[in-house]
Image (spheres, rainbow, N blue to C red):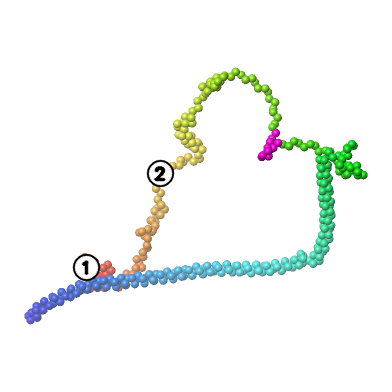
Amino acid sequence: MATVVRILDQSSTVVNEVFDRNRIAEDLRHREFDASVRIQAWFRGARVRAYIKFLNRCATIVQKLWRGFLGRAVYREIIKVQVMIMRLNYYNAMATKVQKIWRGYYTRKYIHNYYSRKQYLEGLMIKNSIVRQELSEYTEQMALERQQKEQEEAQRKLEAEASRKHYLISTEVVPGIYNSPFKPYPDEMEYILRSVQPRPPDKPKPKRENRSGIIIPESPPLPLTEPLPPIGQKLQGPFRMPAEVQKQRYKKLQPTLRVQTSFTSVEEAREAMKAKEWVMRVNDNIFVPFTRRHRGYDPLLHTTSAYGHLPYGTRYFREEDLEQHITDQRFRGVVSPIPVFEKLNDTYSKGTETIPGNPV
């Protein structure tokens, strides 16, 4: 009975202490929640970063091995090519050396023989002397022909001059200037004047204009024509002939192009073109525009596949393998759940999990 009395005396103090502890726990609840969220975020970030680092290291190892394999394959090909080139160069050098030795031997024995060369040079000297003699004779002959042509040209010019001055020839009564009575014999020009014929008179020069100098063509002779018929009776005054007036009055109509063209000429030309096209064409299937074709829709290849549509797009953009996810039961929430949300079958944070048997 004494214990009950003592507890009743201390009841007010116990109640106050309980309320104080609850108030302190309520004040520290948000701070503990933020701290737990931050610790979980850091831990999960470290776990993801470690996993990404592990994947990068694995990818690096795979790439290193694959690139090493490709590099060794390329290196082997390069070595093969270099060995082949080295062998070809060696074989070419050996072939060149053999050809050099053989050509030197063949040249010294058959081409550049000393005695045959000496004999060739002696024959060449004899041939050169013969050619030089023939060239000298040919030069003398050409000089004589050139001199003869010059003499003939001079003689022709002298005869032309004598023909032009034929009026200076001597006569029996009056001696010319080339047949002077004071000389014992006549001049050579006198004999030339006697041997040539006088030059015919020059043709009349064509008429030219005084300023421009253009040759005025001679007018052709007038043709001989028949005499004109007599002029008939003509009306006096500004009148036309009756036949012309009659022709003007009864002339044919001259319609315009618009009147001559048919009103349906375009449709007739189109029908004629269609008829000609129908006769000339090879294929009887008439081309129909796409808007007038009544045909079913042909689906695409990837939509008609027997294995379903392709795994590409917003739904199947990233492939997931759930077997590689870390689902160890050791990673659990460390913060106790809140009783209010526990009644609703949910916790305050999605990352936490209710552990059975833990006190609230």
In the image, is 16 to the left or to the right of 115? left
Quarter of the image for the C terminus: give it: bottom left
Mark 2 closeness class: few <14, some 14–19, many ≥20 residues within 10 Å:
few
Q: Residue furthest top?
A: 233
Q: Main structural element of the magenta stretch: helix, strand or loop?
A: loop
Identity of the residue drawn at 26% across and 68% down: 349
Q: Is residue 38 visible?
A: yes
Q: Residue furthest front?
A: 182
The spot of residue 248 in percent (x, y) is 52, 23
Residues drawn in magenta: 207-218
The spot of residue 356 in percent (x, y) is 23, 71
Q: Secondary structure at mark 2?
A: helix
Q: Quadrant of residue 10?
A: bottom left
Q: Nearer the viewer, residue 316 or 11?
A: 11
Quarter of the image for the N terminus: give it: bottom left
Give the CA separation, mark 1 to mark 2: 65 Å
Amino acid beneath label 2: Thr
**Front position among marks 1 and 2:** 2
Q: Is residue 355 visible?
A: no
* Mark 2, residue position: 291
* Mark 1, residue position: 342
Identity of the residue drawn at 41% across and 49% down: 298
Identity of the residue drawn at 86% across and 42% down: 177
Amino acid beneath label 1: Glu
47 in the magenta segment: no
In the image, is 55 to the left or to the right of 82? left
Q: Nearer the viewer, residue 295 or 159?
A: 159
216 in the magenta segment: yes
The spot of residue 227 in percent (x, y) is 67, 22
Residues at discs 1 and 2 in contact (Cβ within 8 Å): no
The spot of residue 269 in percent (x, y) is 48, 34
